[in-house]
Image (tube, grey):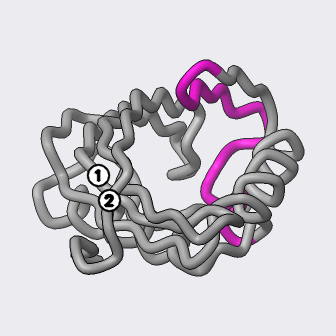
Amino acid sequence: MKNKEPLQPFTLETALQKVQGGEDAWNSRDPKRIARNYSKNTEWRNRDIFLIGRKAVVKFLAKKWQKELDYKLKKELWAFTDNRIAVRFEYEYRNLKGDWFRAYGNENWEFDEYGLMIKRFASINEIRIKPHERRL
């Protein structure tokens, strides 16, 4: 199995790298690229949706971006320990009607010895915004 650098235990520098790598992957809006950061049996909670496995992640993300257009995300490191990272994030998107939204949330990540995420728990809230209120 190929390692997904950087590996644990995290330092401030490597935790920041991991967060930036996650942000870059999500902003690609490529479900397969994103899923390569997760273990084959990754556990997810995204709002009220619970997923298990990389294949479920790919399917979820492909469906997400059919409805969330022009998606743009910013992640910020909140805290880290040996194999865990907490992030704060916000993202913006427009729906199929052209209405814009900004979502805010927190994620808790846990990694295995190969640097793959085995757990991702996301709490997310969103608000409707006007186009001129966009920040991302």
Q: Amino acid at mark 1?
A: Phe
Which quadrant of the view contains residue 42? top right
Mark 1–mark 2 distance (CA, rounded to whole Å): 17 Å
Residue at point 26% right, 44% down?
87
Vertical order, 22 against 123 (above or below): below
Vertical order, 113 against 4 (above or below): above
Q: Secondary structure at mark 2?
A: strand
Whole-percent x, y for residue 128 in the image? 38, 51
Residue at point 36% right, 31% down?
108
Residue at point 75% right, 27% down?
51
Range of residues picked out in magenta = 33-48
* Mark 1 residue crowding within 10 angstroms, few (<14) / some (14–19) / many (20+): some
Tag 1–tag 2 contact (CB < 8 Å): no
Horizontal placement of 41 versus 78: left or right? Answer: right
**Magenta stretch contains residue 44:** yes
* Mark 2 residue crowding within 10 angstroms, few (<14) / some (14–19) / many (20+): some
Horizontal placement of 118 versus 33: left or right? Answer: left
Q: Secondary structure at mark 1?
A: strand
Residue 36 visible somewhere in the drawing: yes
Residue 83 visible somewhere in the drawing: no
Please state, as top left, top right, bottom left or bottom right, where the N terminus lies in the image.
Answer: bottom right
**Residue placed under numbered mark 2 in the picture:** 129
**Labels 1, 2: front one:** 2
Whole-percent x, y for residue 60 in the image? 78, 45
Which quadrant of the view contains residue 98? bottom right
Horizontal placement of 26 versus 127: left or right? Answer: right
Q: Earlier in the sequence, mark 1 or mark 2?
A: 1
Whole-percent x, y for residue 105 in the image? 32, 39
**Residue placed under numbered mark 1 in the picture:** 89
Residue at point 72% right, 53% down?
64
